Image: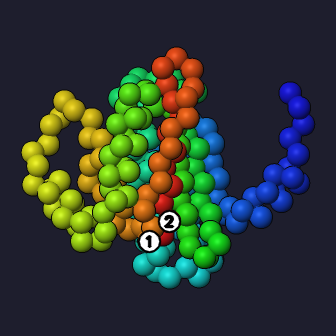
């Protein structure tokens, strides 16, 4: 294994204003621990309370979605890994990004649903949220773009961005980015 250049990694993280980064298997307890660290970081960063709450809520929703999905597939620890990054953009807004392996078909459907959400304004997102609330829940079906994703879109100050990159064995790496 090659030596990891931590200084170069640090410089890259600093230049991209990355404040928190995680890559690996994710569990409920880990989601909670990283969430606590994120809360502490946001407090130390003097984040506006509503922004801090939104960043935390989006982080929780994204990581729980990953955890639920990989658990529903029965994947092993390596397959169930996630990559989560919280950073700032050039406008000094918080950016929450998360990604994981996903069945390619599931990923394509999810990207389409997120692209549709990205086309909606605040009023459209509110209407979509209310419509989703009224829909009967089908326990047999994965939720796709359910309340959680609509809520992320509502908390975001810019349209959600999703991407899918092909991986092995009929899977892809799904990435979701929300700007708060």
Q: Position of residue 123 (x, y in %)?
A: 24, 71
Local SS, label 2: strand
The residue furthest top is: 169
Q: Is residue 132 left or right of residue 63?
A: left
Q: Quadrant of residue 151?
A: bottom left
Q: What is the C-alpha distance between the residues marked 1 and 2?
A: 6 Å
Q: Is 122 situated above or below 77?
A: below
- Mark 1 surroundings within 10 Å by alpha-carbon count, few (fewer than 14), some (14 through 19), many (20 or more): some
What residue do we see at 26% from left, 54% from top? 147
The mark found on residue 87 in the picture is: none
Which of these two is toward me, 172 or 9? 172
Where residue 86 appears, as percent x and y from the top left, is: 59, 60
Position of residue 122 relative to residue 81, above or below, is below
**Is 105 positioned to the left or the right of 88 in the image?**
left
Q: Earlier in the sequence, mark 1 or mark 2?
A: 1
Q: Position of residue 12 (x, y in %)?
A: 79, 57
> Mark 2 and mark 1 in contact (Cβ < 8 Å)?
yes
x 17%, y 35%: residue:
139
Q: Residue at point 62% right, 63% down?
A: 87
Q: Which mark is residue 157?
A: 1
- The reply, left or right, for residue 41 in relation to residue 133 is right
- Quick check: can you spot residue 58? no
SS label for mark 1: loop
* Label 2 neighbour load within 10 Å: few <14, some 14-19, many 20+: many
The correct choice, above or below, for 86 with respect to 168 in the image is: below
The spot of residue 97 in percent (x, y) is 54, 54
Q: Which residue is mark 2?
A: 179
Q: In this image, 39 relative to 138: left or right?
A: right
Q: Quadrant of residue 14?
A: bottom right
């Amino acid at each position: 294994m090659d030596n990891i250049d931590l200084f170069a990694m640090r410089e890259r993280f600093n230049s991209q204003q990355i404040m928190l980064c995680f890559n690996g298997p994710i569990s409920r307890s880990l989601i909670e621990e990283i969430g606590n660290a994120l809360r502490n970081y946001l407090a130390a960063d003097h984040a506006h309370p509503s922004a801090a709450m939104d960043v935390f809520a989006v982080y929780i929703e994204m990581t729980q979605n990953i955890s639920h999905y990989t658990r529903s597939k029965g994947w092993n620890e390596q397959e169930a890994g996630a990559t989560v990054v919280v950073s700032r953009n050039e406008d000094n807004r918080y950016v929450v990004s998360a990604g994981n392996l996903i069945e390619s078909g599931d990923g394509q459907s999810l990207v389409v649903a997120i692209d549709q959400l990205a086309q909606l304004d605040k009023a459209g997102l509110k209407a979509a949220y209310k419509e989703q609330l009224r829909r009967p829940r089908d326990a047999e079906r994965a939720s796709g773009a359910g309340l959680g994703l609509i809520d992320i879109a509502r908390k975001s100050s810019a349209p959600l961005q999703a991407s899918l990159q092909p991986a092995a064995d009929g899977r892809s790496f799904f990435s979701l980015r929300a700007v708060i």
